[in-house]
Image: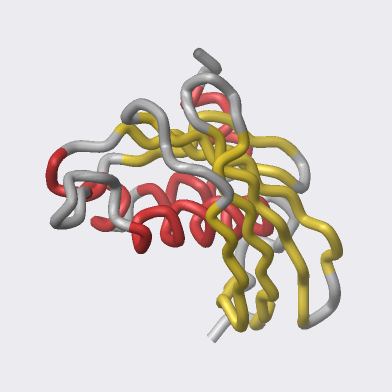
Amino acid sequence: MPDTANHLDRYPALAEMQAVPLFGNLGYQFTDAGEGWAEITFTASPAANNLYGIVHGGVWLVLADSAMGGALATVAAPDERVITAQSDFRWLRPLEGPTIRTHATVLRRGRTLSHCEARLYDTTDRQIAHATGTYVILPPE
């Protein structure tokens, strides 16, 4: 497994994002990152399941949005704020196993608007979902 502390040291915004209670409550974390990309790994617990006993679709969306925001955080200035403006999500196939790995990349980093994509994979590395997002980059308050 990649050295999580190393990329959190290189990209302090990822450590700040990961400190948000939602990350801990759902049990997902950044597991790798580089300039213009970030990866999140999530292993489902029963708390993330819907009434049918499968990972709730909203959890998939949170993973995609968080990974895309993390990818942008690797190229944004430390005092800039990355805010979701729009997203699109496609479920491609059911999740096999309890783990989702989400890999997000920055497609275009603009001055105020930026575009990203995320691909979600199961434990066999099959792509199970695809997302795109548009983000507003705001100056510090």
Q: Position of residue 84 (x, y in %)?
A: 57, 76
44 or 73: nearer the eye?
44
Up the image or down, 112 lies above or below 29; here it is below
Q: Position of residue 20 (x, y in %)?
A: 31, 57
**Residue visible at 84% across and 78% down in the picture:** 111
Q: Position of residue 8 (x, y in %)?
A: 52, 36
25 or 35: nearer the eye?
25
Left or right of 66, for residue 90? right
**Residue visible at 60% across and 74% down in the picture:** 87
Up the image or down, 28 lies above or below 6; here it is below
Q: Quadrant of residue 78?
A: bottom right
Q: Quadrant of residue 44?
A: top left
**Residue visible at 45% across and 52% down in the picture:** 63
63 or 20: nearer the eye?
63
Up the image or down, 78 lies above or below 82; here it is above
109 or 99: nearer the eye?
99
| Residue occupying the far top of the picture | 1
Q: Position of residue 130 (x, y in %)?
A: 63, 53
**Residue visible at 44% across and 42% down in the picture:** 94
